Amino acid sequence: MSETISAPSERQILGHPRGLATLFFTEMWERFSFYGMRALLVLFMTTQVVDGGLGFTDATANAIYGLYLSSVYLIALPGGWIADRLMGAQRAVLVGGIIIMFGHFVLAVPGVQTFFLGLVLVVLGTGLLKPNISAIVGELYPPKDPRRDAGFTIFYMGINLGGWLGPILCGWLAAVYGWHYGFGAAGVLMLLGLIQYLATSNYLGDAGKSATLDSGNPEHAASIKRGWFGVGFAVAALAVVVGAALTGALTIDARSLAQVMTYVIIGVAVAYFAAMFMLGGLNRDEKNKMVVIMVLFVGCATFWSGFEQAGSSFNLFAQRYTDRVIGSFEIPAAFFQSLNSIFIIIFAPFFAAFWVMLGKRNLEPSTPLKFAIGILFISLGFVVMAGAAVYVAAGDQVMPTWLALTYLLHTFGELTLSPVGLSATTKLAPKRYVGQMMGIWFLATSLGSLISGLIAGEFDAENVAAMPDQYMQLVLTYAGIGVLMLLLTRPVRKLMGDVK
């Protein structure tokens, strides 16, 4: 890694490498496009065909939503490998952004086939861009540079600015001009992000520029050739499957596929952990820490299965059961998807300061305790939704404050659990398996996203009388898992050994 990238003689902004601004705005517009489309996805799929939507059932739409989110996290694994071994992170970000842009433009073309093709393209592009742009941020700084954490904090703000603006602009365009204008806007803004990335990429220097394999080395050149052959084969196989599905030669039931993928991911996780214990050559301390990673895996999947109701069942709740009229203006349902990012921008500094204050007094909660608290916040959010559902079951619409309070509680859960999860996993992992443990974290997030779509599909728009009981079942489920995590906190903490 070159330390000249962030040396004082290099151009800086706010005391950080100028390249951070390049990545900040690229990520901001990528997240704008991602969250803007995420806010529209389920609403568009469940809108009747005569009104410009696809007319899917809630169960089908929510299953597709879960499959989409899950696939983004799964594709991030080969996306990181391609950058590391074949093309370098800088080029991966550029190619990923281009694929995302075209995906949104395809989504802007009306039609069932173009909708699914656009989704596939966005998944592939996001899987290539998302893991690698974060890696470049880290490479802007020398290993022991004290500005590194602050740099990632600034970068994180770009994520949330995009997550705040995307649903508002795309949601407004969809509500006023039509769904496909919202999808198209996401592509236009991704294009702007790419233009600024290309115009300012020289400030990135050598950070993420080259793959780890040297193409000048004959052995490495052969390995790169084999790698590209594998990527080409995988893309060709995917193209055949997607083409068969789009032409009707292959029929895919989204809900059944989501259920199968859920079992497959659980099976892969169980098999992986079993193999690690039996064949991984772990010593006693490493096995103890592997047990902790297993607990965190379950906690991560549980949390995201509840949190990702935001884009599915909560989105439909905003559209159908929330009084969104203020004077002569009706708030588009997609606007509510901005609340999470707004709350993060507001409260993240307070959470960070709170943990620092507790840490100085040796009172900061351990990682397993933070996981338990995060899951309990999810349960509290569903308590609010259960209360709102009582009014809905009685035939009334509810005020937006019900959803806003739910999003606030779930954001508190995210701020408690999410920042420590991957960090703790990499600290707990045996050094020779750190990369694989990062993959396990993505796998847990993918599993949670799948389950979230299946949960959302259980809500029946034709049977709102059952909604309060359904939300109460979720309250009890997440509360039970959260309490179990609380009870396990002390023994799990002991297994962590010297990891804080």
Image (cartoon, rainbow, N blue to C red):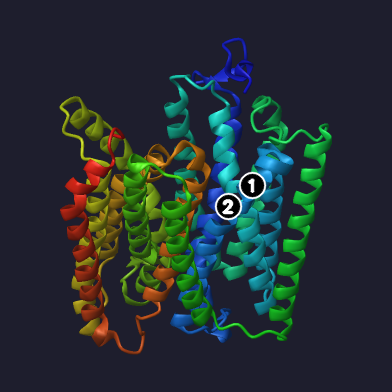
Give the CA distance from mark 2 to mark 1.
6 Å
Q: Amino acid at mark 2?
A: Leu
Q: What residue is rendered at 71% in x and 74% in y? A: 241
Residue 427 in the image: x percent, y percent? 39, 37
Can residue 332 be seen here? The reply is no
Taking depth in this image into account, of 396 and 145 the one nearest to the observer is 145
Q: In the visual, does 362 lie left or right of 371?
A: left
For label 2, count other residues whose C-alpha is less than 10 Å away and answer few (under 14), some (14-19) or many (20+): many
The number of callouts visible is 2
For disc 2, the marked residue is: 77
Can residue 470 be seen here? The reply is yes
Taking depth in this image into account, of 262 and 91 the one nearest to the observer is 262
Q: In the visual, does 226 lie left or right of 488?
A: right
2 and 1 marks in contact (CB < 8 Å): yes
For disc 1, the marked residue is: 81
Kind of element beneath mark 2: helix
Kind of element beneath mark 1: helix
Q: Is residue 151 above or below residue 72?
A: above
Q: What residue is rendered at 22% in x and 42% in y? A: 494
Q: Amino acid at mark 1?
A: Trp
Q: What residue is rendered at 44% in x and 67% in y? A: 266
Q: In the visual, does 3 lie left or right of 394?
A: right
Q: Which mark is residue 487?
A: none
Residue 455 in the image: x percent, y percent? 37, 74
Q: Is residue 255 above or below residue 201?
A: below
Residue 380 in the image: x percent, y percent? 20, 61
